Structure formats: C-alpha cells, structure tokens
C-alpha cells in the first residue's frame, strides 16, 4: 500500500474548498483497516463492465474476509463471483458505524478471490444510518439483474426512503472507487422526466476522493439498497460536482463539529443513462431506530473512526 496520490480533478476540488494541506496530511492515513474489514457485515465492490460501473456485494455474519498477508484480503467462500482486475471496495458495518475503503487488484487463487490492496483507509462514522442483517445467512449478489424505467414505482419508493447509498466513481487511470453516501430520507432527488438525479454532498474529511473522480471523468453509478427486500437499485450516468462551501482560510481539521446535522459542502448532479434492479443483492436489513445517527453536529471524538 502507498499514500494516496491525488489527480488533478481531486486537487481542483480541494483547492476550491481550501483543504489542500489537510488532504496531503490525510494521504498518509490508514487506521485499523484490517480490523474494520474483518468486522464488516457488508462488502460492496465496484468494477467496470460494458463501459459502466457495476456493483457486487457480499453480506452476512462477519468475517466475510480474512487477511492473506500484510496487504491482501481473501474474500471468503465466494470464488469466481468477482471480476479479476481493478476493483474498488468498501467494507462496512452500519450497525457499528465502521467502514474502510479497500481498492486494488483482484485475482483468482486456489483458495478463492484475493484482493491485493493498493489503497486502504478507515473513514469517519458520520451519516451512517444504523441497520443490521435480519439473519446470519450469507448472500452474494446480485442474483439477477433487470432493467427498469425511471418512472418505475418501486424505484421511486426506494429513492424516496433511502438513508443509505453507495457512490461508485472512477479515476482518470481507470481505478474504481466506492464511497458511502447517506442522509435523511429524501436527500436523493430524482426527476424521471428530466432523467436527472441530484443530492447534497455533506461536509466530509476534505479529501474529496469521489467528488474529484466525478470532476475528472464524470462516470458514476449510485447504488441504493432496499433494506426490506435485499434488492438494490443501480442508477448509472454521468455526473458533475459543484463546491458550495468555499472557505476563506485553510481548513485544518478533518472532523469538524457544526451547528447543523447535515451541513452541505457541495452538490452532485447526474444525468441518468439507465437504471437496473439487482435482485437478491444483500441480506435484508432492519433499521435500528433507537440507535443515534452520528452527524456533523456530533462531537469530533464521536465522528472519528473507533
């Protein structure tokens, strides 16, 4: 693994937000990546196929991966489900508010699919809606894929209710990446007539890895799981990112306590090309209503990975 190397799209967004020095400092951050990966009950991977980004997921009782050396992970029991080559991944436990980026090369071995990690780093706990799997069975998805019109009732309902989604983006050197995108129900705004999707990008750590990818290549896919059924929605298109929170002075800290729960950093606008329903994508999940969601209004110590 090596420190993050920022491409011009990411640098441009960092400069607009006045987080360049902060981003350079965070380029060295890794954190307890192995621990977070082995405690994840959901793995979300993005890969390129037919010119677009598509998702594969593994869910169930952890561990779903095991360490196979200092910078490699073996995806347990699901050999052949992932495409060899460049892969972007996120290992996440929504119930514990823990997540880690896992990007690298995947290759098949006699023991299973091996992810040779080039980038790994833990992330903050903000904006994660707590949920847990309804049972301990394992699921590798999708089981089936079908195209949908943008005015499909199920599609509209999933987008309207969503608190959890995942943004797949790609760098100029064709490296896929997966990031969590969460917010209050209704934060995703779909206009099927205009074939457009927009959402606010909330205050993050100042690195702008995904926003910079979208700025550079525009290619993106948003994955929106339907927790009740275990199906998921893929919204594929081309996006643009606009910074709205422009600081006069350099930002010094990655975790900032704000008066608002969901302070807006920027805006993502997407022109949609197609929508897909991914059947049997994950184990159905139950929202933990009594668990509090950590937001930018939480103390910085609560926001930090732990």
Image (spheres, helix red, strand yellow):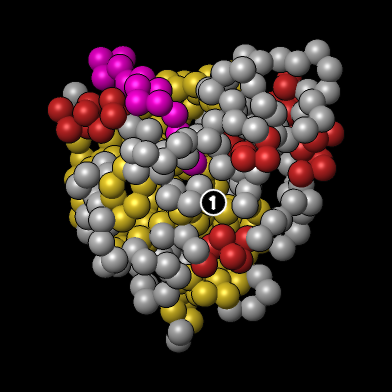
Q: Is residue 190 magenta?
A: yes
The answer to whether 277 is drawn above or below residue 273 in the figure is below
Residue 192 location (% of width, % of height): 26, 19
Find disc 1 in the rendering and name its residue.
99
Choose top left, top right, bottom left or bottom right for residue 264.
top right
Choose top left, top right, bottom left or bottom right for residue 72.
bottom right
- Toward the bottom, the furthest residue is 110
Residue sitting at x 75%, y 16%: 247
Q: Is residue 122 magenta?
A: no
Residue 39 location (% of width, % of height): 50, 63
Circle 1 residues within 10 Å: few <14, some 14–19, many ≥20 = many
Residue 1 location (% of width, % of height): 72, 63
Residue 215 left/right relative to 206: left
| Residue 72 in view (yes/no) | yes
Residue 167 location (% of width, % of height): 47, 39
Q: Secondary structure at mark 1?
A: strand
Q: How many marks?
A: 1
The answer to whether 186 is drawn above or below residue 103 in the figure is above
In-front residue for pair 128/17: 128
Residue sitting at x 59%, y 65%: 35
| Residue 10 in view (yes/no) | no
In-front residue for pair 106/94: 94
In-front residue for pair 253/294: 294
Residue sitting at x 34%, y 52%: 132
Q: Which residues are magenta?
A: 180-196
- Toward the left, the furthest residue is 153
Residue 246 left/right relative to 36: right
Residue sitting at x 47%, y 60%: 40
Residue 156 left/right relative to 76: left
């Amino acid at each position: 693994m090596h420190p993050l190397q920022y491409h011009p799209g990411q640098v441009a967004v960092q400069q607009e937000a006045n987080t360049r020095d902060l981003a350079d400092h965070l380029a060295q951050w890794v954190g307890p990546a192995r621990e977070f990966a082995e405690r994840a009950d959901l793995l979300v991977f993005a890969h390129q196929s037919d010119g677009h980004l598509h998702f594969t997921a593994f869910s169930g009782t952890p561990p779903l991966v095991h360490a196979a050396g200092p910078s490699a992970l073996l995806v347990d029991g699901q050999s052949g489900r992932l495409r060899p080559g460049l892969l972007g991944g996120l290992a996440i436990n929504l119930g514990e508010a823990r997540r880690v980026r896992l990007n690298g090369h995947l290759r098949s071995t006699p023991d299973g699919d091996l992810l040779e990690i080039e980038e790994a780093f833990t992330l903050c706990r903000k904006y994660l809606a707590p949920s847990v799997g309804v049972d301990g069975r394992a699921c590798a998805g999708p089981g089936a894929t079908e195209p949908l019109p943008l005015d499909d009732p199920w599609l509209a309902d999933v987008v309207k209710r969503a608190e959890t989604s995942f943004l797949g983006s790609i760098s100029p050197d064709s490296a896929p990446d997966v990031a969590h995108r969460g917010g209050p129900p209704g934060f995703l705004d779909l206009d099927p007539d205009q074939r457009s999707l927009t959402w606010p990008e909330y205050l993050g750590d100042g690195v702008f890895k995904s926003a910079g990818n979208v700025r550079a290549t525009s290619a993106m896919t948003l994955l929106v799981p339907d927790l009740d059924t275990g199906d998921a929605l893929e919204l594929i298109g081309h996006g643009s990112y606009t910074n709205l929170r422009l600081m006069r002075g350099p930002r010094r800290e990655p975790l900032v306590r704000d008066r608002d729960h969901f302070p807006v950093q920027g805006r993502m606008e997407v022109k949609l090309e197609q929508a897909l329903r991914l059947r049997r994508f994950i184990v159905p999940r139950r929202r933990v209503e009594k668990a509090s969601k950590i937001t930018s209004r939480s103390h910085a110590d609560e926001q930090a990975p732990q």
